Amino acid sequence: MQITSIDARDLSEAWFLCLRKVLDEGHEYRIERGSYSGQQRKELDMAVVQVRNPGNRPLIPDVPPGVPPPTTTEYIDSYLPYLMTAHQAEGEQYTYGQYLEKQIDEVISMYRKDGFNTNQAFMTVGNPESLKLEDPPCLRSIDTRVRYGKLHFICYFRSWDLWAGFPSNLAAIQMLKEYIGAEIGVADGELIAVSKGLHLYDYSWELARTAAGVA
């Protein structure tokens, strides 16, 4: 397993750096089970993405002219309730919020009541039944750490679509981090994301090359 470490200034830079890494170094294979079964995918064995200033605005990538944006600010605003609340639209198998909603409140309460020196403020996504879903949750955990007067998040994605998922996921998670930080009275810190499945589907390869300036 090759571990790829990416050190980025903000969310936009993180996305562009990841695009280049996946295009240059990603393992190419045909999907046998899961989303887009039968299609090709380029994927890093294991990616660790450290974002130093994830709160820098805008939270979404500034793509070159002619490249369709992978997400929009309007979409992020509509996506945030999916992450933070248990509301489930018709046809949805799950939402991250159905697992996280009560845990968010508990993490805030834990820090307020017991202080910041704990390793227990950890939020999980999914349960044993999730494995039976046609598309199990991609985001599986959000760990939290208050250190040096700042709130940091460490997230794990079992599988992660770099084009259609990464920009929206991290922008919304960053907004959640800012919300929790404000509730417990600490500054905003780093966002670290880990995945053994950071990938690009073949439909997005040419778009990714254009966006990243890769020949």
Image (cartoon, helix red, strand yellow):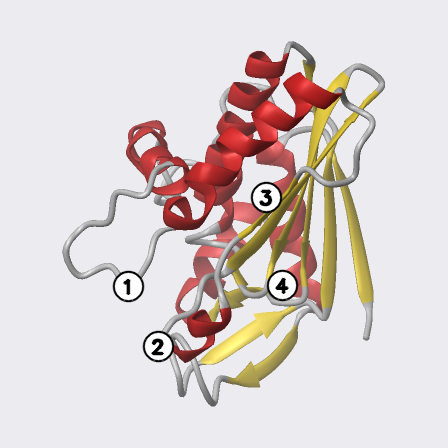
Point out the tag, 4 or 3, that comes first from the N-terminus: 3
Q: Amino acid at mark 3?
A: Trp
Above or below: residue 1 compared with residue 117: below
Quadrant that contains the N terminus: bottom right
Q: Nearer the viewer, residue 91 or 202?
A: 91
Alpha-carbon span between mark 1 and mark 4: 31 Å
Figure label count = 4
Q: Is residue 61 visible?
A: no
Point out the tag, 2 or 3, that comes first from the N-terminus: 3
Q: Is residue 114 left or right of residue 171?
A: right
Alpha-carbon span between mark 1 and mark 2: 9 Å
Q: Amino acid at mark 1?
A: Gln
Instruction: Select label 4 or label 3 by which is in front.
Output: 3
Q: Furthest residue to the front?
A: 113
Q: Give yes or no for contact between labels 1 and 2 (Cβ–Cβ under 8 Å).
A: yes
Q: Amino acid at mark 4?
A: Leu
